[in-house]
Structures are given as structure tokens and as C-alpha cells.
Image: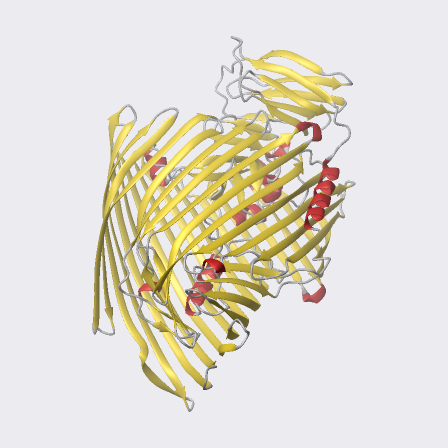
């Protein structure tokens, strides 16, 4: 049945893409310079003669040759551009025959072009020395589209279904607006909230670290970055969007984005409110809070676990629970003078989540297993405000100062009602816990950071010094009412009724300095030193509630002071050449961990030292063609939670206690990446290999007593290994006018857990394949369809017969259709199928969503929207979690079918701009 479904889905996708007029006209030619040398990567555009809109686009091959397939009949302009040469253009009338333009000689541009005003046509793509630049006007967008919609149309840029962005195979880590940070490093705020109509150019480049940018010496710390260069007219007025919608089940959605730009200052406001599980920003504050709560409920069923890629678990944004968000932010940047600039932002977030959970967990012993059935209801609220500021000043041609200030404050509350039953294989009860846990907390943090950069008269000689401080405070107040029962020969029932108070004060400083000396021929040696000191004071006071009175509990109350001092010195040699750059070096790191428990009744002192080698190599074969190798080592200290010797009894059947005697982990990480992007054929090949080895890996030691009460404590276990590989290949199929992409991935990990003093080795193998196909000409119809498949197998040394597997298969289709001039129909369909070894039947979740937009005025500023979510009413919140000691599958409450009706308005007010200014060359 599954095979038939896959066959039918792929057949439907193929029918959607096939255009039977596959034998259109072909345009041929070769681009050379005056000496008949071929010009590779010249941009060749076919433009509509009426409105100069882009019809087709290719780049010339290494021979200078180009071919445009499937050109329709009619009147067109052909335009060819190449950096440093004058533009070539010619009028064409296409009929039934192919057109051979022959050899086209581009003339060198004898004048240094600073800017060019173009009124009718422009180049869709420009390849500079370190930047790929897209002319947004060449890619048709619809009124109301945001930047994310524009990015989906750009060759080489991909927007994943979770909103993350890739450019030429690499994850985009920064999105800038006119070269300035926009709400910090949260990329989704810019891509999901800024109007695409405001963008003149999208520039893709590798942003260097502050140090590499200042010194000009590569350090391997580049981050793939997108810069949104706004249209000149947008810098002299205001623009934005306001949206309001309501629907069945009291569902609502409100969003606003308003921007006011001038040549020297920029101010942006974004706001949203909804109860349909949408967030157009990151969830870091909420994750941090819930991660802390999860650690206090480490054995229960209501914690949040991070997924494979360190992100949110599958479905949290749209599937887990019913969420309500109110958020708003203000971003302000200003050029104070020619040498000093300011970038700042403040963000407010009020987030609610109601989560019902039904989980089945298989727990592993030495040669047996038992089940846990977990039911729970969790209601949480996170109220937070965060801010960041960056002040940059170029004191002179040889000196820079950068000051950053980050901070935030918040309050949180969570109430959890849960039931946890452990069962033998015959379904007889072992133990049971019914508990109510209510916790509230407040926190604040402040992190000032100062960087001083100094160049000397000798070219390449430089010095960088950094000082950073972090101040934080967290206070929690919790009430626990737990009633637990042991089922044995004699029934035993107990109760914990407690008030639990905790406070954590943190203070740290970090000092770093580096000196670079040139050795000639673009070779350098770097000396570095650093000192980091982290101090925490953690007090935990437990009170038993007896006859409504608070009685202090000395057994569970703890005072813990921790001081972690880290000193490091380093030496690195680097070479930066035309085609390649590399660096090799090492750091010597010495750490001292001092701790005091219960007012010096217990003293802790551990010292660690290690030599940490590093190696970086990058080779550039050409534009879009490179190889990268990176080897790093790191000494990771235990977390405060793992060190603090505090018994957490919030779940009496799953008790957690820290271990102040933990040692540091020593990590080796090796990664290799290869990418080749063919701009002539729009083909991309990307391959990566990663390997990791961790000595003294910190894992939980688990002891399960005769009543199956689990007591967990962190310990340094045996070594852990991991590896992963990934291959991506995308290519157009020109006769079918489609683009295909296939991704193969695999991973393996090997670790150890200690259960009842018996080591159990766990090996996990994973493999997956993604395949997608989409049409290339998207003026009227935009369709993406494909399949994702992943399988994971777990094997255990002590109980090999309990090996587990799960599979996840997703069929998906996304479509957008322009109906006439004033109507747009969008649809999303996913069918997710889950299969797990300890569950007999597969779970299928078909999810269909449809959106219809109608423009009601001739300027297309006002539009009406109608949306249906989960038309089939089949949404299910299914998630899985694998651990060294258990496998779990859970189902949570989710949003069901709802209808949403709304309207939105594009806000525009500009001074009149004369033409479009396009700067030819690298990023400006």
C-alpha cells in the first residue's frame, strides 16, 4: 500500500511539472574578449521586450559558450554582462528556428564604474571576487511577499521547510540589512518579516570573523551570510505590512512590520500575536527555560529533548501542544559619523504553551526490559525581554574599537500534572507516581564585550585584545505534591509534599589577546593567550509541608559555590595564498575547578590540562568550487547542573543527583567539505564527512532498585565516537523544465551507559534519502514535491535481542498558482508515516493546508486571505526520543482543523527615486 501511495504521488508530481511544449526555441552563442579568450561565468539574460522582466538566464561555460533552451516565440532582448566589461544587448524576434548569435566580443570597460543607473533592464546575477549578487528586480515576486519568498526564487539559494536558509550548500548564519545586523543573529526575523519589494539586491558572501576582517588573515571562522541591500527609494521613507485575521475555534493571527529608513539611520518595528503555533523568530529564551525545567524533571514525561541537529524536536513549532504568542521588537541603527556606527535592538516575547502528552517508554536493563506509561498535562508561560547593542568606531586607519552589550530579563511559570506507571512484560504494575509540580522563576543576564584592534606600520603586523563579562541571576520557587506507590508483596504508598526554592548567581569574565607577526610571502605566526573565570553561587532550600507549615529539610537543602578558572596559551602558523589558505597550531589549556558544598563541609578541587591541536585548510578551485578541511580539539567542562551535588526529587521514581567530581571532556572533531556549483548548468554537488571522538565522555550512570526507582547521576564514562556523511546533488532537467535535488545522509554513533554497574555499549546507525523536484519557470505556477525517508537502528551489547529501529517517511507537495492578475492559490500537503519496532502498526499523518489570497485594489496594497489548516482533520503530534537507556514514542495534543479569514495592507511612503542604482563589482 505504501509503495502504491509513493508511485501515485510521484506520478501526480510528474504530471504537474510536465509541459508538453518541450521543443521550444534555442539561442546559442559564445562570449569572448578582444583577444578571443573565452569569458567564463558571463551572465546571459533573455528579457521580455515589453517590461524587461526576466524570461531565462544562464551563465557561460569555461569555453565561453552558452545555450538558452525552450525560449518562447515573440520579441525579446538578449543582454550579456561580465565584470570589468561593457554590457552587450541586442533585440531578438524568435520564431520556429534556433538562433545562433555566433561569437560575441565584449569590450573592456576603460572607466572604473562606481555606479550605473539602469531604467529598463539589469543583470539577474553578478559574480564578484567574493560575492554573488542577485538583482531582485529580475525575479518576479508577488505583492505582500516577504524576503523568504524572494530567496526561494534565487539560483543556488534554498529555503528549507523549517525556514532555515542555505546558500550554495552552506547554512546561512547571518542575514544583514544594508550591511547592518538586524535583530542580532536571528536570521528568521529578517527573512519572514521584511517585504521582498523593498530589496534591490541579495548578496551572498562568507563573512569573516571580526579578527580576520581587521587583519586580512584567514582564520577559518567564516560564516555564510546574506546581505539585503535595499532600494534607494526605500532609504527615504517608510514601508511595511499590517495583517489581521480571525477564524473558527477563536483562532487569530496578527502581524505588523513597519520600517523607516533614511540615508544615515534605520528603524524597524515588528510585532505579532497569534494562537496558531507560528513564530517568526527563534525560540531560544523558551528553550533555555524549558531545558532547565526539563533537567528538574529528568525522569518524567514532560521534558523537552533536543533533536538530532540540536534544534527543536520534530513538530514542536506546529505539532506539540497549542501555543499562543505575543511578540514585538524594535531595531535601530545609525551612522553617528563617518567613523562610528550604532546597531541596537530590543525584543519582547510572551509565549504560552498547553501540552498534553501520552508516551510509551521501553527501559533497558542488563538482559531485560520494562515499560513505562506516561500521561501528563503541562501549561507554561515565558515572558522575556532581550536586547543587544553594537557600537563600532574606527579611531584611525590603524585602530578599531567594538563594544557590544547583550542582556535580558524574564519570568517563567510552569504547571505540570503527570502520571507515570511502570509495567512488567505481563502488564502487572511495578510502581506508580501521580504528581503535581508548579514552578515559577525570574532571571536576568548582562554581557558587556569590548574589543580593541591595532595595526602597526609593518604590513600584516597586528594585535587584538578582548574583554568580556557575564552577570546572571536566576531564582525559582516550586511546589511539589507527589504520591507514589510500590506494588510488591506488600503495597507501599508514600507522599512528598514540599516547597523548593533555589537561587543561582553567576559572574564570569573572559580576557583574550592575540598578536600576529608577518613572515613574508603572506605567511604569518600568531601568539595568543586567554583567561576565563566563572563563579557560581547556588543555594537550594527545601521545606516539607506539614500541617500547612514549612519545615526545613536539611537532607535536600544544599549550598554550593563553584569557581572554574581556565588559562590558555596558543601558537598558530598560517599561510594565505591566491588559491588556498591553511593554518596549523595548538593551544595549551589548564583548568582548575574549585567547589565548596554546605559551607565548607565538603571541599572540591580538580585540575585538568591538555594540549589542543588545530588544523585548517581551504582550497578554491574557482568560483563556487572549493574544498575545506577542519580539525579542532576542545576541552569541555561539566555544566553547573551536572556538578551541583543536589538531589532532585521532583519525580520520586526518577531521581537525579549531580556529581562535583566530574572531569573535563576532551573532544576531537574532524570535518571535510567539498562543493562544486556550476553556474552554467545550475548544477550543485556538495559532500561532507564529519567524525568525532570524545575522551571522558559525560553520561548518566543509572541505578534501578528492586522497586524500579531510577537514580541518575552524571559520570565520566568510556570514550564515545560518532561520524556522519552527507551528499547533495541538484540539477535541472531542461527538457522537462524542472529542477531536481537528491540528498543522501548517514550517521553512526557509539557510546556507553552504566546501568546497575553493568556497562552497556549502544551503537546507533542512521541512513536517509531526500528527493525533490520543482518547476523552473515560476511566473504562474510554482510547485515543489518530493519524499524524505530516514531509518535508525540501535544495537546494545548487553541485550542484543532488544535492538530497536524506527523509520520516518514523508511525502510532500507545495504549490502556488496565480489565478488571473488578482488571485493566488497556495497549498501544502504532507503525509508522514512512522514505524517503530515496539509498535505493531505504522502511524500515518496526512496534513493538508490551503490558502487563497485576493487583491482588492489596483495597486495591490490591500488583500483578503482565506486559509484552511488541516483540511482532513488528521493532524497528530507524534515524536520519538532515543536514549542510551530507553526508547520512547509519544503523542501530544495538536492544532486541529481551523478556518482563518483576514486582510492585510502594504504600507508604503517614499520620496520619489529616479531609476535603479546598481553598483557593478563586489559587495558595497
Q: Classify residue 446 as left or right of residue 199.
A: left
Q: Residue furthest bottom?
A: 547
- Say which of 731 and 859 sits in front: 731
* Nearest to the observer: residue 46 or residue 839: 839
Q: Position of residue 724 (x, y in %)?
A: 45, 44
Q: Residue furthest top?
A: 35
Q: Report the front residue among 146 and 825.
A: 825
How was this image coloured?
secondary structure
Q: Is 75 situated above or below 6?
A: above
Q: Where residue 321 sits: x, y (%)?
A: 58, 64
Query: Residue 46, relative to residue 405: is it above or below?
Result: above
Asked if one can make out residue 799 in the rendered structure from this viewpoint, the answer is yes
Which residue is depicted at the point 53% across and 64% down? 350
Q: Quadrant of residue 508?
A: bottom left
Q: How many marks?
A: 0
Left or right, residue 556 beside residue 816 = left
Residue at 40 percent across and 80 percent down: it is 499
Horizontal side, residue 771 vs residue 397: left or right: right
Q: Quadrant of residue 316?
A: bottom right
Query: Where is 27 relative to 54, above or below?
Result: above
Vertical placement of residue 631 versus 440, above or below: above
Q: Position of residue 471 (x, y in %)?
A: 33, 60
Q: Position of residue 111 (x, y in %)?
A: 49, 17
Report if residue 397 is visible in the image. no
Residue drawn 68% across and 25% down? 47
Amino acid at each position: 500500500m505504501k509503495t502504491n501511495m509513493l508511485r501515485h504521488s510521484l506520478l501526480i508530481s510528474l504530471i504537474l511539472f510536465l509541459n508538453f511544449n518541450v521543443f521550444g526555441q534555442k539561442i546559442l552563442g559564445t562570449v569572448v574578449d578582444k583577444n578571443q579568450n573565452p569569458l567564463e561565468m558571463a551572465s546571459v539574460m533573455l528579457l521580455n521586450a515589453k517590461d524587461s522582466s526576466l524570461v531565462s538566464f544562464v551563465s557561460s561555460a569555461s569555453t565561453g559558450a552558452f545555450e538558452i533552451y525552450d525560449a518562447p516565440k515573440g520579441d525579446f532582448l538578449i543582454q550579456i554582462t561580465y565584470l570589468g566589461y561593457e554590457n552587450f544587448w541586442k533585440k531578438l524576434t524568435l520564431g520556429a528556428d534556433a538562433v545562433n548569435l555566433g561569437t560575441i566580443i565584449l569590450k573592456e570597460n576603460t572607466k572604473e564604474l562606481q555606479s550605473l543607473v539602469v531604467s529598463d533592464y539589469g543583470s539577474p546575477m553578478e559574480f564578484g571576487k567574493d560575492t554573488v549578487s542577485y538583482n531582485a528586480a529580475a525575479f518576479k515576486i508577488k505583492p505582500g511577499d516577504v524576503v523568504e519568498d524572494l530567496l526561494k526564487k534565487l539560483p543556488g539559494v534554498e529555503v528549507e521547510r523549517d525556514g532555515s536558509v542555505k546558500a550554495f550548500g552552506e547554512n546561512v548564519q547571518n542575514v544583514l540589512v544594508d550591511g547592518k545586523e538586524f535583530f542580532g543573529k536571528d536570521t528568521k526575523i529578517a527573512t519572514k518579516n521584511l517585504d521582498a519589494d523593498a530589496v534591490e539586491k541579495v548578496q551572498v558572501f562568507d563573512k569573516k570573523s571580526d579578527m580576520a576582517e581587521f587583519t586580512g588573515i584567514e582564520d577559518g571562522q567564516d560564516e555564510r551570510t546574506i546581505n539585503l541591500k535595499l532600494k534607494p527609494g526605500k532609504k527615504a521613507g517608510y514601508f511595511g505590512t499590517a495583517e489581521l485575521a480571525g477564524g473558527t475555534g477563536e483562532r487569530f493571527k496578527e502581524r505588523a512590520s513597519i520600517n523607516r529608513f533614511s540615508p544615515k539611520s534605520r528603524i524597524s518595528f515588528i510585532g505579532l500575536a497569534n494562537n496558531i503555533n507560528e513564530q517568526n523568530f527563534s525560540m531560544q529564551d523558551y528553550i533555555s527555560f524549558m531545558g532547565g525545567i526539563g533537567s528538574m524533571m529528568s525522569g518524567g514525561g514532560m521534558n523537552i529533548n533536543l533533536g538530532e541537529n540540536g534544534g527543536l524536536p520534530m513538530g514542536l513549532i506546529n505539532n506539540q501542544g497549542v501555543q499562543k504568542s505575543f511578540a514585538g521588537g524594535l531595531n535601530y541603527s545609525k551612522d553617528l559619523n563617518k567613523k562610528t556606527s550604532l546597531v541596537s535592538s530590543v525584543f519582547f516575547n510572551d509565549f504560552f504553551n498547553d501540552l498534553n502528552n501520552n508516551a510509551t517508554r521501553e527501559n533497558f536493563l542488563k538482559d531485560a526490559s520494562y515499560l513505562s506509561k506516561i500521561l501528563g498535562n503541562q501549561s507554561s508561560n515565558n515572558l522575556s525581554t532581550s536586547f543587544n547593542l553594537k557600537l563600532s568606531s574606527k579611531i584611525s586607519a590603524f585602530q578599531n574599537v567594538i563594544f557590544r552589550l547583550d542582556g535580558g530579563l524574564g519570568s517563567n511559570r510552569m504547571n505540570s500534572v503527570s502520571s507515570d506507571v511502570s509495567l512488567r512484560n505481563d502488564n502487572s504494575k511495578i510502581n506508580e507516581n501521580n504528581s503535581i509540580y508548579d514552578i515559577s522563576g525570574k532571571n536576568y543576564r548582562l554581557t558587556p564585550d569590548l574589543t580593541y584592534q591595532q595595526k602597526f606600520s609593518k604590513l600584516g603586523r597586528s594585535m587584538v585584545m578582548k574583554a568580556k563579562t557575564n552577570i546572571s541571576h536566576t531564582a525559582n520557587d516550586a511546589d511539589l505534591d507527589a504520591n507514589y506507590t510500590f506494588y510488591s508483596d506488600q503495597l507501599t504508598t508514600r507522599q512528598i509534599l514540599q516547597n523548593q526554592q533555589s537561587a543561582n548567581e553567576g559572574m564570569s569574565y573572559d580576557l583574550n589577546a592575540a598578536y600576529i607577526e608577518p613572515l613574508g610571502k603572506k605567511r604569518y605566526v600568531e601568539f595568543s593567550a586567554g583567561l576565563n573565570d566563572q563563579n557560581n553561587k547556588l543555594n537550594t532550600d527545601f521545606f516539607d509541608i506539614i500541617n500547612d507549615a514549612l519545615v526545613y529539610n536539611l537532607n535536600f537543602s544544599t549550598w554550593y559555590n563553584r569557581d572554574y578558572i581556565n588559562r590558555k596559551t596558543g601558537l598558530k602558523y598560517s599561510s594565505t595564498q591566491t588559491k588556498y589558505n591553511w593554518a596549523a597550531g595548538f593551544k595549551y589549556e589548564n583548568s582548575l575547578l574549585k567547589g565548596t558544598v554546605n559551607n565548607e563541609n565538603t571541599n572540591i578541587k580538580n585540575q585538568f590540562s591538555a594540549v589542543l591541536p588545530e588544523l585548517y585548510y581551504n582550497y578554491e578551485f574557482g568560483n563556487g568550487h572549493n574544498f575545506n578541511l577542519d580539525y579542532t580539539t576542545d576541552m569541555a567542562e561539566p555544566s553547573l547542573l551536572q556538578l551541583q551535588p543536589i538531589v532532585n526529587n521532583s519525580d520520586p521514581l526518577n531521581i537525579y543527583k549531580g556529581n562535583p567530581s566530574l572531569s573535563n571532556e576532551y573532544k576531537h572533531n574532524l570535518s571535510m567539505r567539498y562543493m562544486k556549483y556550476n553556474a552554467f548548468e545550475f548544477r550543485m554537488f556538495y559532500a561532507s564527512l564529519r567524525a568525532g571522538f570524545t575522551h571522558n565522555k559525560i553520561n548518566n550512570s543509572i541505578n534501578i532498585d528492586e522497586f524500579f526507582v531510577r537514580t541518575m547521576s552524571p559520570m565520566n564514562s568510556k570514550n564515545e565516537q560518532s561520524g556522519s556523511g552527507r551528499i547533495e546533488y541538484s540539477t535541472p532537467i531542461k527538457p522537462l523544465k524542472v529542477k531536481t535535488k537528491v540528498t543522501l545522509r548517514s550517521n553512526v554513533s557509539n557510546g556507553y551507559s552504566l546501568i546497575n554497574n553493568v556497562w552497556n555499549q549502544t551503537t546507533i546507525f542512521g541512513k536517509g534519502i531526500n528527493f525533490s523536484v520543482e518547476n523552473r519557470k515560476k511566473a504562474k505556477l510554482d510547485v515543489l514535491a518530493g519524499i524524505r525517508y530516514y531509518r535508525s537502528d540501535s544495537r546494545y551489547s548487553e541485550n542484543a535481542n532488544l535492538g530497536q529501529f524506527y523509520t520516518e517517511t514523508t511525502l510532500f507537495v507545495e504549490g502556488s498558482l496565480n489565478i488571473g492578475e488578482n488571485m493566488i492559490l497556495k497549498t501544502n500537503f504532507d503525509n508522514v508515516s512512522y514505524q517503530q519496532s515496539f509498535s505493531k502498526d505504522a502511524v500515518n499523518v496526512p496534513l493538508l493546508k490551503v490558502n487563497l489570497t485576493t487583491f482588492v485594489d489596483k495597486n495591490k496594497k490591500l488583500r483578503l486571505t482565506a486559509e484552511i489548516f488541516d483540511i482532513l482533520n488528521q493532524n497528530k503530534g507524534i515524536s520519538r526520543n532515543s536514549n542510551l537507556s530507553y526508547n520512547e514514542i509519544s503523542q501530544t495534543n495538536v492544532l486541529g482543523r481551523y478556518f482563518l479569514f483576514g486582510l492585510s495592507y502594504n504600507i508604503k511612503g517614499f520620496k520619489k527615486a529616479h531609476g535603479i542604482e546598481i553598483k557593478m563589482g563586489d559587495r558595497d
